[in-house]
Every structure is written in structure tokens, then in C-alpha cells.
Amino acid sequence: MLRLLLALAAGAPLVARACEPPAGFSMRADSERYAVFFRADPRVISVGNYFSVEAVACAKAGGTAPEGLKVDAQMPAHRHGMNSRATVERAAPGRFLARGLMFHMPGTWQIVFDVQRAGETERATRDLAIK
Amino acid sequence: MSQMSRWIAAAMVLAAVAPAAADEAVRFDENETAMILRHGPWPQPPVRDPSNRVSGNPAAIALGRALFFERRLSPGGVVSCAHCHAASRSWTDARAQAAGIGELVRNTPSLWNVGRNRWFGWDGGSDSLWSFAIRPILHPAEMGADAGHVALSLRADRQLACLYEGAFGLPGNRSPANDERVLVNAAKALAAYVETFVSGRTPFDDFRDALERGDAASAARYPLEAQRGLKIFAGRGNCAMCHFGPNFSNGEFHDTGIPFFVKGGVDPGRHAGIQRLGADRFNLLGNYNDDRSGDSATKTRHVDAQHRNFGEFKTPSLRNVELSAPYMHNGRFATLREVVLHYSEIRADRLHSDGEALLKPLKLSPREADDLVAFLRSLTDPQAEQTALALSGIPNRCAGSTSR
């Protein structure tokens, strides 16, 4: 985990001028003004196993990176969320590490990113099929 | 074999196992097939608990076995663990609600494959098997002991003391701190023993593996009624959403519409379990967790108490479920058929208003209910009784002690 944090910290001087996916971040969620590129650790999310999410959030129009990020998930079809609460730490401007996520059922989960900047929050979501 | 090739092989077999009579043919779609394959293989690799340094340790297992049947762990020598978790009764007691020194309000869960759980107890109030073992020892209505009594029992009996020393070394002089450490070590030995309660293969496992390897002849030996029940289980019944994976449990908590009123109040289930977990000095965030990486405590660190947890109870494993009647957290149903009929006619008004929208009345026909029961019975290990009796055999005599 320490190596991961060091890698994140060393990854970029992150003032998000360009909103491009960083190398290795294969998934993306969008809100109106922000894009969130993310990847899971372990890479394959499986039912019943805890995982972390590394996320890079940036403003589509360029400019200063978001200050904060909250990460959650839900199963809209079942009307429930996770049984765990993720904690998020900011590794660098625009870069975040969320720990403690776990999907306890197979099916379609929606991962939710609440992007925070200047006292405002925008929600970006992405559906994930978990088998 | 890749997942795709396994599915293709399974699909070919599923077409082949369909019997001649068209009205009885069982055909599984791609999603059902994938779900069936996720319920194996079985057995899984042995469990080793990183929070318990003696998990898998033969000396600790021997001590745990001796303690499991030791009535003197309860003051007055009244009950042992085996009093409720009887080997001859599939590690349960055949009662609707358990009784130790006093009466309890929940059903005694079977201990088959319990080492694979994430949370322990119907409310998940324990986050490790060893801390779960402490709970009945100290509970005033179960064994009613305290750390001092347990430590005294272990020091006073030559065999137990010898077995303890073999697993942990000398227990140290009497003091509150040493006595508590002896209690925790005793619980870790009990956990090491109970982790060996692994059930064997079942007719379902043979069918599932036949599908995976494309063996139509073997798959066709699985009774047709069980196949039909499996189709309901993995398909429209949504049973496999919670009874998921090789142990037929996702290890989490759900409101299944069973009334939670008990004598004198309500049983809050998971809601209270999370509170108890947080207050438990023996939880994985405490000093007795042997896992220095901290990974084993991730679940405890991140567990989220929510309003909907009220009245939720843990999804039990279904392996050997036929042998562990009565059923549900309060032993409400005497037979598997009653359980199936509960889900067939489940009342939405009994479910938590802000709970999950997963359960709906299945409206099963009588034959479909029979089929689902046949499937559940196919999860029985034919050798379960012999295995349990072998596991409960006379403990090894301690080989000797350097100090006595």
C-alpha cells in the first residue's frame, strides 16, 4: 500500500489542464463538468472481496483540479448500496485513493463519485457488471 | 480452461442432459449457467485465518477439540460448546431457539464450513471465528464463564494444561491480563478446531463439475427434480443473489420478512450486531489480532451501520442445510418446504420499508416447491455424519509437558 501511495504521489504534479485519461486508468465516469478516470485494486472486482479505487478527477474545461471526492456504490435495481463505507484520501491534487469498497452481490453496480470543488458537488456515475 | 470455454462446454452438456420428454426438459440460459458454475468448485482450499496465529496448527486444533467438549469451561460444569453444537446433529441442536444455561432467542447455527464466513453470528457481531468463540463462553445465558474461570480450568487440569502449553507455551501466573490472554488463546484454539469442520462433496458438486468439464453422462445422473429446482434457484428465484458462491452465502445480511419480535421486545439483528462489534474489545481492530498487516481488519474498519440493518440477519450457508432444521434466525420453520413456501408467498409488508427490493413472492406451484426442496437436499454431503463423528473423536492425549 505504501508503494501505491508513493506511486500516486509521484505520478504527477496534478493541475488538471488537460482532461485526458492517465495511463492505466481504463474506466471513466462523467458528470456535467468533470471526468473521473479510475481503476480498481485488485484490477478485477469480484463479489465479496474488498477493493480500492484510484481515481483521477479533472474539469473537462480545464483549470484547477477538484478539491475533494467521495466514493460510494449502489445496486439501483435492488435499491441498496454497499454494506461498507469507503474512506477517501487525497494523494495529490486531483488524485484520490478510496479504500474499503465491497460488492456483496453479483449484478449491475453503479459506482458513484461525488466531485467537490469550491463548495459545490457534482455526481459522476458508471455502471459495472459484477459476476 | 477459460471462462468462455467453460460456458460453451457447459452449454453443450446442458443441451445433452435434457431428457427425452419435452415437457420435462431443463434448459439453463447463459446467465443461469454462469451462476451455477460460481457455486464451486468444492471443496475450496483450506481456510487460514491471519488474525489467528494458531489457525491450522495441529497442537492448537488438539487443544480446541478438547475444549469444545469440555463442560468445565462453564461454571458448575453444566454446558460445553458441544451442548448446542452437537456433532450428531450437524453441529447444531435441533431446537428452534438455543438453550445454554438459560434460554436464548435465536437458532443455533450449524458450524459446517463456518471458517469461510466474513462475519460470525446471526447478527455478525463478531468479525473473527475466535472472537465469536469468546461470546458464548462469556454470555450469561450460554456458558456464563469469565476469563478467570477459563484460565483456572486450563491451569487446573493436567491434560488441558499440557495441551495449552503445547500450543501456546506456559499460561503465566494468575492476573487479569494473563487470564484474558489465556481466554483469547483458548478461543483461538477453538477456532482452529472448528475451522476443520469442512463438509464434503455433494450431488450438486458432481453436477456442477460435470457441466464445467462437458461430461454429459455424469451431469445426467443429477436428479431431474433437483435440476428444475436449481433452475429456479439460479434464475427467477433470485436465491443465488444472496446464497452465492461455493459456500452458498454472500456472507452478508438481509431482511427476509421473518418477524423479529421476541419475548419482551425485538431482535434488531444486524443493527445491534454492528454496535456490538464496535464495542467488542476482542474485535480485529484490537490488540489480540495477530495479523500485523491490518488487512484482516479492513471489513471492521469500513463496516457501515445503516437504518436498513434493523431486522437483517446473516445469509446462512446452504451446504448440509437438510441436516440443520429448524430454519431461519429464530427457528421459525421446521422443514425446508416451509422455508420455500415462505419465499413463495413472502409478504412485502413484512419487509423493511427502506430495505432492498430483491424479494418478491415467487408464487411457486406445488411441484416447483418440491423441486426447490429437492435441489436443497442435493446440497447434502452423504458423508457428513461420519465426518462429524470423526472430527469429534476422543482428543489426543497430551504427549507430555516439560513443566509438570
Image (cartoon, coloured by chain):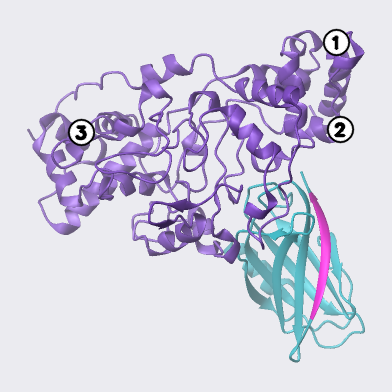
Chain colours: A cyan, B purple
Tag 3: Cα neighbours inside 10 Å, few (<14), some, or many (≥20)?
Answer: some
Q: Magenta residues, as a range?
A: A122-129
Instruction: Please state which amino acid type lies under the numbered disc 2.
Output: Glu
The span from disc 1 to disc 2 (Cα, nearest Å) is 19 Å
Of badges 1 and 2, nearer the viewer stands: 1
Indicate which disc, 3 or 1, sits on the residue closer to the N terminus. 1
Local SS, label 3: helix
Instruction: Please state which amino acid type lies under the numbered disc 3.
Output: Arg
Above/below status of B148 relative to B364: below
The span from disc 3 to disc 1 (Cα, nearest Å) is 54 Å
Above/below status of B332 relative to B221: below
Tag 2: Cα neighbours inside 10 Å, few (<14), some, or many (≥20)?
Answer: few
Q: Is residue B330 visible?
A: yes
| Tags 1 and 2 touching, CB below 8 Å | no
The answer to whether tags 3 and 1 share a subunit is yes
For the C terminus of chain B, the image quarter is top left
Q: Where residue A125 sits: x, y (%)? A: 82, 67
Tally the numbered discs. Answer: 3
- Label 3 sits on residue: B71
Task: Give the residue at x 74% y 59%.
Answer: A79
Task: Give the residue at x 10% y 52%.
Answer: B174
Could you tell whether B135 is left or right of A119 in the image? left
Q: Where residue B193 sits: x, y (%)? A: 36, 32
Q: Which mark is residue B19?
A: 1
Local SS, label 1: loop
Could you tell whether A126 is left or right of B390 in the image? right
* Chain letter for mark 3: B
Q: Where residue A74 sits: x, y (%)? A: 73, 61
Q: Is residue A13 visible?
A: no
Indicate which disc, 1 or 2, sits on the residue closer to the N terminus. 1
